[in-house]
Image (cartoon, helix red, strand yellow):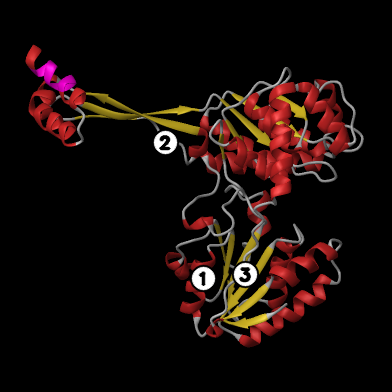
Amino acid sequence: MKIVKISDKVSIKRSIDSGTSEQQAIVNSIISDVRTHGDEALRMYTEKYDQVNQSTFSITTKEIEEAYQKVDQRFISIIREAAANIRSFHEKQLRPSWMTTEENGTILGQKITPLDSVGVYVPGGTAAYPSSVLMNVIPAKVAGVKRIVMVSPPNENGVVPAAVLVAAQEAGVEEIYKVGGAQAIAALAYGTESIASVDKITGPGNIFVALAKREVFGDVDIDMIAGPSEIAILADETARADEVAADLLSQAEHDPRACSVLVTPSIRFAEAVAAEVEMQLALLPRQEIAARSIADFGAIYVTTDIDEAVETINQLAPEHLEIITENALELLGKIRHAGAIFIGRYSSEPVGDYFAGPNHVLPTNGTARFSSPLNVDDFQKKSSVIIYSERALKENGAKIAAFARIEGLEAHARAVEIRLKND
């Protein structure tokens, strides 16, 4: 793992995959086909990309029951406990509608309304991601969304992994379809004979899913365009090199484009972690993927002191940030940009991925500078409420009309003045 001194004024390398023009053309074609041909197009693309020929897409009650038979009771217990933690955390984010009455009788307020429908994309095929189900569905449930639709690509046998179906059932999803890729995003956005359209689409996917979400945005809302996973670790010599190395590799095994970075003021600690990474990398089942990630997007940045290390972190604005230093909590106030912040030796990033409660759908590619983790607010919308009193209009009507005329909008001004005249 390469070690770089920040004093050398190097640019911090970031993994960004915005897709190629060829990939975008493929996505655009798929979306157009689904909008025009509906289920027929879904069947065609499912056979083409998933090698599955299926007449229907809906998951049946029987398939849910069979899924429960395929997983052990301990997994179900873990899923339920994780779901309870996630639900408890997100319930604390709920905000009520409110009204306030002014002295002149005017009532102003904000009405909070859950979205009518949400589509959740869960990656599938050869892998299973029940954690993605919980993290996307539970905040929507807490927000009060009535219709939640889950889509996930079938494996070569035409089924969705049992763990994903169990997680969906435990989270309360009642509508599940075996379809994936850009075609699933198009179905959620525009609807087909089998799948009614939704108002918002959330959930991670490959580059084709990401490009499709970007393309349909505006017709529906989306959560974000997520890039490859990232972790940055701010550590000093009070941390353990083997534990820090393990945490760096926990992200590297996700994807060849995942970004794992250590920032430390200690060259001795940097060298110890670099050695540990090489040692542990050789023993990983996903060694090839992790090795490419570390080689292309992994780095250890050595700073002159802890303050420079903190500023480097703020420049990175990482998806995941671990702080493993002496008096780590004292540094929290200095961190301006990070999706999720894990403080202390025992707060390893996978704790947040699966079990602690905060959402693991996080801003990537430096977007933590201006965006937040997926949360309850993402599944609600806000309407302003204005009940202007007669007294308030008499007090302020002339000012409102004057303001309108400054903008050259005479009809706006007259709409207020006619009420003043009529009274």
Q: Is residue 369 magenta?
A: no
Image coordinates for residue 155, horizontal then vertical, percent? 87, 38
Q: Is residue 415 magenta?
A: yes
Q: Which residues are magenta?
A: 414-420
Compared with residue 190, is residue 229 higher up or lower down, i.e. above or below?
below
Could you tell me which residue is drawn at 91 percent across and 37 percent down?
156
Image coordinates for residue 72, horizontal then vertical, percent? 85, 40
Image position of 99 (left or right of 56): left
User: Do callouts 1 and 3 mark residues in contact (Cβ within 8 Å)?
Assistant: no
Image position of 201 (left or right of 62): left
Find disc 2 in the rendering and name its residue. Answer: 95
Rendered image: mark on residue 13: 3
Find disc 1 in the rendering and name its residue. Answer: 328
Determine the secondary structure under disc 3: loop
Q: Quadrant of the C terminus?
A: top left
Using the image as rendered, state which of residue 337 and residue 329 is in the foreground: 337
Could you tell me which residue is drawn at 79 percent across and 42 percent down?
75
Could you tell me which residue is drawn at 52 percent across and 32 percent down?
143
Which three-letter amino acid code belongs to the residue tagged 3? Lys
Which three-letter amino acid code belongs to the residue tagged 1? Ala
Depth check, mark 3 against mark 2: the one in front is 3
